[in-house]
Amino acid sequence: MDIKKLRSLILLRIFVTYLLLASFFLYDQKFVIFIYPMFLSYLAAFIFLLTIIYLVIYKFLQKSNERLGGAVESSFYYFTYFQIIFDIILIITLIVITGGIDSWFSFLLLVNVISAGITLGKRTILIVAGLSGIFYGVVVELQFYQILEVPYLRSLTPKDFFYNIFANITALFLIAYLSRYLLINLEQASSSLITIARDFSDLYAFHREVIENMPFGLLYTDHGGSVMLFNRPAEEITGIRREAALGMTLVDVFDFVSLPIAKGIYKGTMAANQKIIELKLSEHRDNSGVMMGFVITFEDLTKITELEREMKEKEKLAAIGELSANIAHEIRNPLAALRASIEMLKEGSVPAQKMSRVMDIALVEMDRLNKIITDFLVYSNPRPPEFRIISVTSILKETIEMLRNSIAGHTVEGGATVQLIEDGIDVDVTISGDYDKLKQVFWNMCINAVQSFGCPVPEIAPRQKRIVISAKAITGYVRITFEDNGCGIKQETLTKIFYPFFTTKKGGSGLGLAIVYRIIQEHMGRITVSSIDGEGATFNIILPTLPPAQGHIK
């Protein structure tokens, strides 16, 4: 039971007693119902003395309970039970000395029943109601037979006495039933609230642990940007104590964020510790859509950025090394041929009829060397693109016409002919780009497709070779596709075909696709390839239909 309720019961008893006593003396003791006014004073004095005794016992039990750690809590229950029963006797006494059946204070029995329910719970409330009804009925019956010499109106009949007893007992049990019903509901509600409070406490503790142990910083601000939540990783990343951060705004914490605050992704360097921070800012709205604040998550990208920078440097050095090796390899072959030719000419050991042949070889190797140097210069120091509004469709049509003339009557390995198929080229699509460079890209794609037919043809391969060129406009972009059913590209070399000087073709420089890749990048586009070895390859080029400054494919 709640020990505080016992103390409230003691104080309530003395308050009600002296409230009635004060009203009695306020009217100069002129109430007709007070048959024995002197006894009323005695009763008040007795209740006052009894209250002192109750308080002494209460203090004693309270100290014993604190000393023994709640071991005597049951004593409070029996002590309260005794008070409730003894209060019935006190109320009955008050009823007797104020007129019995004519007393105005029978309602105090109802108050006592309610007090029993509040202090002792639903189990004792019916017992108290029953005892109160029995005591009241016995007293009124004793008054009727004048065993208790308390006068009453002679006009009252036995039926009046019976009805009075019945009405009061009914009221007692009705109050007891209603109080018990309310107490049951109250206990259920209290139990539910306790369970909810416990669950909420557990949930709050869980959420707090999750928030405090996140691998990234988390803070919450109101709609004005004032920080209201700041977790432990946020302290570690920013170097700002939580107590100090709660009095700051988002702009004070991250100086690279500008006002007004808007949702999105921000990245910048903190001036205080030079850490590179990326934060994601989202809005928090309630169920009705009203803006409540901002939820911000952020992480320290300093080490990751440094690692990325180191990786790029290493990749750059590796690319330079690979490029240098490829250049050396490509230049060594024609130089070796040139050296051999010049040595033969110098020694004069070449017969006159072969002299022209040796010189032709030297000239061919010189041209090959010049082509390698020229392609390398084009790749390493390209001409800046000249952007203007051009028609992709027109460039494709010109390229296709050139290709058609080039392969007219041409047969490939195995005697197969080449069929050129157009798909969607009639739809005019305009972009911002460099006319000559894009024509170079498309022509290179066509030449690669034709050259892919030069490999040995398996017996199961079709004799009819085809090249399919298509263009399709999608929202904001155009996709140009070059598809062939040639020899295809092996999977192990598929990721290297755009590397400078990487080639699987005899006599190829390995710079064609590398130049294509660079030109597409200059146009803020993307090129992808898919292939099955022996079945063909498909190149997809995606270009923005908006100016490069306004559209970029990632």
Image (tube, grey):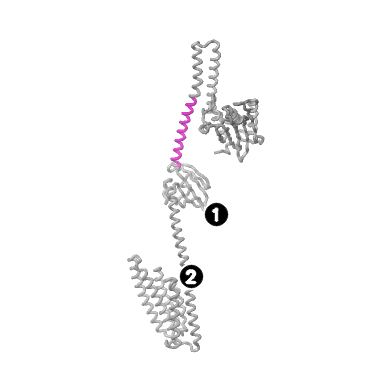
- Residue 457 is drawn in which quadrant? top right
* Closest to the observer, 242 or 394: 394
* Closest to the observer, 398 or 460: 460
Q: First in sequence, mark 2 or 1: give its number.
A: 2
Q: Residues within 10 Å of mark 1 (few under 14, many from 20)?
A: few
User: Is residue 314 highlighted in magenta?
Assistant: yes
Is residue 29 visible to us here?
Answer: no
SS at mark 2? Answer: helix
Which label belongs to residue 182? 2
- Residue 526 is drawn in which quadrant? top right
Q: Amino acid at mark 1?
A: Val
Point 47% across, 81% down: residue: 104
Can you say which quadrant of the picture contains the N terminus?
Answer: bottom left
Q: Is 459 placed left or right of 156 in the picture?
A: right
Q: Is 117 placed left or right of 453 in the picture?
A: left
Point 46% across, 36% down: residue: 309
The percent position of residue 88, horizontal first and vertical second, equals 42, 78
Q: Residues within 10 Å of mark 2 (few under 14, many from 20)?
A: some
Please determine whether, in this image, residue 454 is positioned above or below residue 151. above
User: Is residue 72 highlighted in magenta?
Assistant: no
Is residue 492 visible to us here?
Answer: yes
The residue that mark 1 highlights is: 290
Q: Which residues are magenta?
A: 301-327
| For the residues bearing labels 2 and 1, Cβ distance under 8 angstroms | no
Q: Is 440 placed left or right of 20 in the picture?
A: right
SS at mark 1? Answer: loop
